[in-house]
Amino acid sequence: MFEPIFKRFSQDIGIDLGTANTLVYVKGKGIVINEPSVVAVNNRTKQIVAIGTDAQKMVGRTPGYITATRPLVDGVISDFEVTEQMLRYFIDKVHTNTYSFLRRPRVVIGIPSGVTEVEKRAVQDAAINAGARQAFLVEEPMAAAIGARLPVQDAVGSLVVDIGGGTTEIAVLSLGGVVVARSLRVAGDKMNQAIVQYSRDTFNLLIGERTAEDVKLKIGSAATLDEPLQAPARGRDLVTGLPKEIILTDADVRSALHGPVRSIIESIKAVVEEMPPEIVADIMHRGIVLAGGGALLRNLDIIIAEETKIAVVVADDPLTCVARGTGVIVEDLEALADVLVPAEQETMRR
């Protein structure tokens, strides 16, 4: 009875609920929110102090009674209540100009392909409790493929590698479903941690993960660059305990990232080995598509192509691929219903 009213006043949205960033696509408008998946909580009062960009500024700078954390770890919910608050914040932000009691959108959320049934239910429940009328789930590699405009519903194989903040999703897709998939908990965050560890072991310098990420973005690479790059890194000298600055080169960062990059490449090769022969032929013709923020690592496509003997293509604007994919689904839910993760009917209708 209320469905026509909800449709009029609420805006259906697609959410890329990432470990590092959350992107929100609004039907008919495109991506309207791109903020860090960070929440600051006052431990004394248990109140939310800040969410998103404002909370990100607090990381590493909070007093003892305030904790700025990510409620998602490796792509799955680690703190249900905080995730619910974060989702409510983003849903409310989308509906700032509508009546508060009519903010009941249908929501499509991207999730890692390796999550359990309990984790799927947790994401749906968090979305419903945050104000969604219906919550649909789509696996991130499927959403990334749709965002990259691959023909996922055709009888043609596509291989997508979505390197996010917490997980790397590798999936072979055909006829609207996943043929072979691997979810690897090695991605952007592990790369940052590897840089922190390398700086500590090699230079006796303790740097923060935000500094490590800045260095990765500025000079990070997976294979030798044509022109050498360098960037400063500031932190605490582990010998003297005093502040110290060093200059890192692209070779230093490449050495630090060797482990995570090798893990991703070996997983891609393992997926290729599991593919049916006909799909291998399709992939040889179409190539591997890289999506997610990790796809921006310099020369990663080159080294993957060398190792797998398959052409590699970086998707247009890989950072927003999953969000755009959820958006395509939101725009035409009925036509793309077969790509959604099957869910319990009572959750869908609640």
Image: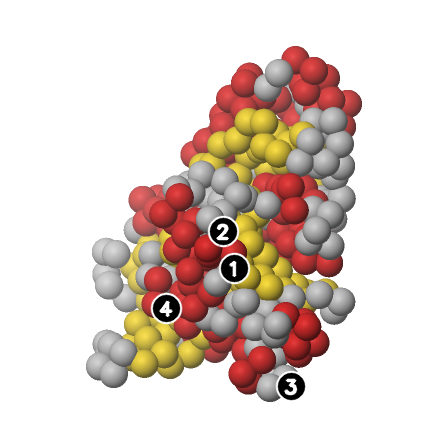
Of tags 4 and 1, the one toward the viewer is 1
Contact, mark 4 vs mark 1 (Cβ under 8 Å): no
Q: Quadrant of residue 185?
A: top left
Reading the image, the residue beneath label 1 is: 349
Scheme by which the image is coloured:
secondary structure
Q: Identify the mark nearer the N-term, 1 or 3.
A: 3
Q: Which mark is residue 179?
A: none
Q: Secondary structure at mark 1?
A: helix
Where does residue 261 sit, x and y in percent of width and height?
50, 35
Reading the image, the residue beneath label 2 is: 345
**x 68%, y 72%: residue:** 4
**x 49%, y 25%: residue:** 266
The amino acid type found where label 3 is placed reads Asn
Reading the image, the residue beneath label 3 is: 97
Label 2 vs label 4: CA separation? 25 Å
Give the left or right position of residue 114, taking residue 295 as reference: left
The amino acid type found where label 2 is placed reads Gln
Q: 10 Å neighbourhood of mark 3: few (<14), some, or many (≥20)?
A: few
